[in-house]
Image: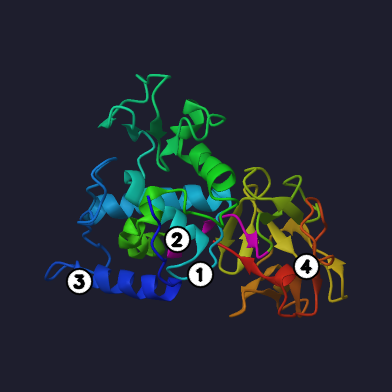
């Protein structure tokens, strides 16, 4: 269908905020937003009916999957991570078992699919014809479908127009609950402003140097945010090694006394280390996987811009 001109991210955000507030029932706490499907939804496709606790739970579920996949938390009500969650809520209610047979215009079951039909599958409704390389097993798995959506559909989290609920703006109805879920995250990837790149480590072991990795591989990119410290699944901490410019950043045993393990996010999205008095940096400015990360003087440049959970 013909695409109409898209509103700005700011206008979408303002509309979403206003809509979320208007949908609060009298006396309802702001922690739960009652959302009904937009009146302008296309007739074809799954009809999503979520409100209250169900909406909150679904948003949290998809926020974690999308964060782990590498979608960047790079904007309030307009960033890639929030948009990915809102799209999944609009497309399926973030249900990993959601299934819609486009050929027959009816809902279906993941266990009874016709190979000849065009089927939208899982939380992100990954189409079986448009994305033949994505197996049913992956499409109907929340974590795997998030990675597939990131890599195969969203062009490493930068392009969403392939989803009907995005191109028709229906997803905007879910931006506010999506943002609330994302704001509550304390676990996921730390993404670079260099699209498709994440803060990673080849092994979760002491002394291992932090390096740049391709997002969406789901290996050696998981971080727990505890205070301003970044912990690996094995409980090691991302640590600056000295105040010397260009010092390599490594994994080390966590110590609550060490300022070298604190990473404060600035308003420009740098990760500032108060112990080293420097910022986390990709010294080459490239996006090649395996590049060793260091600390250097803070500057407003993309290789020093990071988006954490």
Between label 4 and label 1, give the one nearer the viewer: 1
Q: Depth check: 95 or 8 in front?
A: 8
- What residue is pinned by disc 2? 82
User: Mark 3 or mark 1: which comes first in sequence?
Assistant: 3
Q: CA distance from mark 3 to mark 1?
A: 23 Å
- What residue is pinned by disc 4? 240
Q: In this rendering, does residue 56 appear at all?
A: yes
User: Mark 2 or mark 4: which comes first in sequence?
Assistant: 2
User: Mark 2 or mark 1: which comes first in sequence?
Assistant: 1
Q: Residues within 10 Å of mark 4 (few under 14, many from 20)?
A: many
Which quadrant of the rendered structure holds the C terminus?
bottom right
Asked if disc 4 and disc 1 are in contact, CB closer than 8 Å, the reply is no
Asked if disc 3 and disc 4 are in contact, CB closer than 8 Å, the reply is no
Tell me: 289 left or right of 136.
right
User: Mark 4 or mark 1: which comes first in sequence?
Assistant: 1
Q: CA distance from mark 2 to mark 4?
A: 30 Å
């Amino acid at each position: 269908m013909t695409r109409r001109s898209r509103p700005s991210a700011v206008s979408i955000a303002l509309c979403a905020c206003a809509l979320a507030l208007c949908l609060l029932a009298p006396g309802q706490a702001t922690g739960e937003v009652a959302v009904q499907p937009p009146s302008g939804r296309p007739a074809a496709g799954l009809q999503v009916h979520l409100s209250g606790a169900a909406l909150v739970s679904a948003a949290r579920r998809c926020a974690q999957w999308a964060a782990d996949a590498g979608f960047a938390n790079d904007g309030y009500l307009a960033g890639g991570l929030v948009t990915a969650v809102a799209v999944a809520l609009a497309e399926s209610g973030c249900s990993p078992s959601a299934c819609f047979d486009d050929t027959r215009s009816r809902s279906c079951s993941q266990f009874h699919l016709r190979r000849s039909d065009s089927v939208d599958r899982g939380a992100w409704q990954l189409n079986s014809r448009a994305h033949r390389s994505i197996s049913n097993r992956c499409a109907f798995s929340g974590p795997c479908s998030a990675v597939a959506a990131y890599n195969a559909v969203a062009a490493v989290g930068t392009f969403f127009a392939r989803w009907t609920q995005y191109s028709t703006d229906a997803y905007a109805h879910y931006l506010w609950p999506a943002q609330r879920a994302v704001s509550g995250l304390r676990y996921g990837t730390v993404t670079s402003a260099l699209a498709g790149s994440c803060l990673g480590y080849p092994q979760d072991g002491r002394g291992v140097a932090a390096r740049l990795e391709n997002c969406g591989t789901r290996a050696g990119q998981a971080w727990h945010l505890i205070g301003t410290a970044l912990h690996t699944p094995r409980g090691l901490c991302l640590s600056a090694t000295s105040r010397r410019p260009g010092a390599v950043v490594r994994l080390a045993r966590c110590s609550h006394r060490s300022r070298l393990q604190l990473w404060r996010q600035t308003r420009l999205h740098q990760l500032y280390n108060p112990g080293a008095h420097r910022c986390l940096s990709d010294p080459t400015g490239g996006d090649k996987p395996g590049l060793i990360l260091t600390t250097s003087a803070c500057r407003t440049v993309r290789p020093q811009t990071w988006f954490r959970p």
